[in-house]
Amino acid sequence: MVVFENVSFTYKNGEQKNGIYDINLSIGKGEVVVLCGESGCGKTTITRLINGLIPNYYEGSLSGQVLLGGRVVHTMPIYETAKIVGSVFQNPRSQFFNVDTTSEIAFGCENMGLPEKEIEKRIKDTIIDFKIETLMDRNIFHLSGGEKQKVACASVYADMPDIFVLDEPSSNLDAASIEELRRIIGIWKSRGKTIIIAEHRLYYLRELADQLIYLKDGRIENEFSAERIKNITAQSLSEMGLRALKLEELKGRERSFVEKVECLHLYDFFFSYKNGYQAMAIEQLQIPKNTVIAVVGENGAGKSTFARCLCGLEKRCNGVLENSGTIYKRRKRLKSCYMVMQDVNHQLFAESVLDEVLLGMDKKDVGKAENILESLDLLQLKNLHPMSLSGGQKQRVAIAGAIASKREIIVFDEPTSGLDLLHMKEVSVNIDRLCQMGKTVFIISHDLELIFECCTQVLYFKKGNAEGPYPLDVKEERKLISFFEINNYETMQGVN
Amino acid sequence: MKEQPSQSLPANAYLNLDPRTKLFLLLIISTIMISGEIRGMALYARLVLAAIPFVLLILGRRAKAAAIYAILFAAAWLAEAFLIYNTKGIANIVIVMLSGLISRFVPCVIMGYYTISTTRVSEFLAAMERMRFPRNITIPIAVMFRFFPTIAEESHSIDNAMKMRGIGARSFVGNPAVALEYRLVPLLMSVVKIGDELSASALTRGLGGPEKRTNVCKIGFGAWDAAFASLAVSAAVFYFVSLGG
């Protein structure tokens, strides 16, 4: 169905270094193929060669050819390729052309000029297959990331392509939505569709994949059949820089727990939306100081609300924080807490990395700022514009800003969504550094591997209530894994 | 999972005009309100036109926006009618400027807001196609429909980030250029990125093919379209006649 013959491609201007070299690949009809490897290994490039975005949208030099059912992709206009190949992308915020969900499902069919009756039938069928009645006629700006990704899959499905290409579809999803994604891919597979997925998270594809292709520096380094996938050891995965295939095999690293620690006390953290819906209700919470706390729970359980209220961003939350006898009300928390956002681009303002750090200081002290940059390996970048840096570097600049303004509590919102193993470990090292400086760190995450890598406490969120925090010891680790699994089960029941 | 209530889509409004009617009303209201003559009989024509977006907002279940608009406009209108002649000096200049700007521009902005917030992207595309507008014009405008909420969403996140850094409005007094830069640079970066990904996504769904697009959404003129359009046309004719006479 999909054949690569000696394909090499490099991007024009070398703007993206993720070229690929001498790729030979043959994917049969009805197969599920997973492309994996570190960031920049070329897996996204391969997906773009299949859906025709290369060479129609991203320019560069191409040799060899990609065949879809015998037709050469790069000689086909992209609207022709669109009829055979359906694509789902990483970012749920940027793949909708319409503002309402129903029109989005019809969009591809309308572009193909199908008769209206046929489109209406397809919309109906899609709604039934995906069980998305409740998501119809909704404004996409009011959907959660998981719901958006589901609508994106449904819209592509309505176009009825033979081949599906997914580029890191799980990046922004929580455990329950990933489970849902797994179910959707299962439906496609059972209908004989050919599916190609570029992905960092592998565990949810373990049973579905017929072939796992490991790329390194733009070349195919290894291929695993379904049989061999089952026998890949955790150690060889980590040597290849890949994420876990089996969550239940994950182990936290050695941690020591101090018996008596000073605690931060939180009182009366309540929050309701204007429509009266109560998103969070916490009467009291004790957080051990100078620890790294994982904040887990489904989407909508109140984790982000908690983070915003803790950082003093919500005026309608009257909660207080007590730290060694001092009371921190909202305005004071705004100055003593800091959130590293999921999209770190939103919080970098200055013209250079150094200015960015100085911006947060009460007294502008260049020497001190440089020390902070030094401690985060950023000193050599101090004169660059923050926007010219890589994602990981930007995140470190944001952390540097928080340190410079002497924040005691630092909250990370999904710091590792869409990161490979290497970059995830880098984030974990930075969090360790913060902990060594005496900060209290909260990590909102659906990334079990990150949590096991650097957290020492775990705080569960369920329907607006917090439970914990519990020390993340071996027993708690088991509980956390099953929490993720039970979580999935409940949500699936809810959806079906 | 609980959701915030969804913004009312056209389906739950009391009345939804054809996108072409909305654009036509927008054109007439903008032309006449901005060219604003405030004396003589023309005044009444302008009042009628200014009332159109108000009525539409009410019928579109946007009572809050309608109320804000009504208060703003009434205040500006009354100021133009009475205060201008009874004040002097700086106060007079400020009142003339403010009331003039509000009474001329706000009706157009509100009509634009109404048009964009109650028209689905697909309805707009269908309407433009029926008027035989070339796609090079309609598609970029259609993308704009989607971009207003995107900008609002991104801007909200940036706002939060600025609050956390302690760089709120107060730290910019006397330095508006920096305030603008801090706000715009991150906004532009993310909007450009989203735009880029959006185009790629739309291409893979076959936008821009040579086939004639079909549309599942229902558009078409009804009695209400005729009523509003003829009201606007009569007001416009009356306005120009009274200017000439």
Image (tube, rainbow, N blue to C red):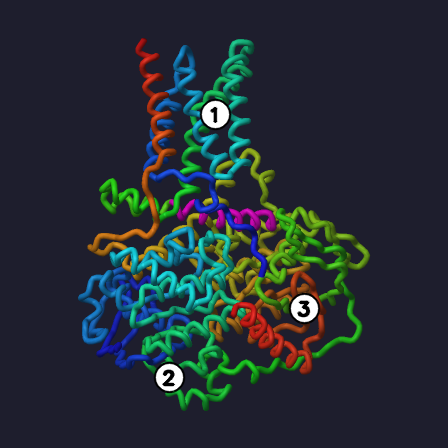
Provide the secondary structure element on which disc 2 rests. loop
Q: Nearer the viewer, residue B99 or B38?
A: B38
Marked residue nearer the N-terminal end (3 or 2): 2
Q: Nearer the viewer, mark 3 or mark 2?
A: 2
The answer to whether any part of residue B185 appears in the image is: no
Name which residue type carries label 1: Ile
Q: Is residue A440 left or right of residue A181?
A: right
Marked residue chain, label 3 = A
Q: Residue furthest front?
A: B223
Q: Local crowd at mark 3 within 10 Å, few (<14), some, or many (≥20)?
A: many
Q: Residue drawn 24% across and 62% down?
A: A78
Q: Main secondary structure of the magenta part?
A: helix
Discs 3 and 2 carry the same chain letter: yes
Discs 3 and 1 carry the same chain letter: no
Q: Is residue A342 above or below residue A189?
A: above
- The residue to which callout 2 is attached is A210
Marked residue chain, label 1 = B
Q: Residue drawn 47% across and 73% down?
A: A420
- The residue to which callout 1 is attached is B102
Q: Is residue B77 left or right of residue A258?
A: left
Distance, label 3 to label 1, CA atoms, is 52 Å
Name which residue type carries label 2: Asp
Q: Is residue B222 magenta?
A: no
The magenta span reads B145-165
Q: Quadrant of residue B104?
A: top left
Q: Local crowd at mark 1 within 10 Å, few (<14), some, or many (≥20)?
A: some
Q: Is residue B13 above or below residue B196?
A: above
Q: Quadrant of the N terminus of chain B?
A: bottom right
Marked residue chain, label 2 = A
Name which residue type carries label 3: Leu
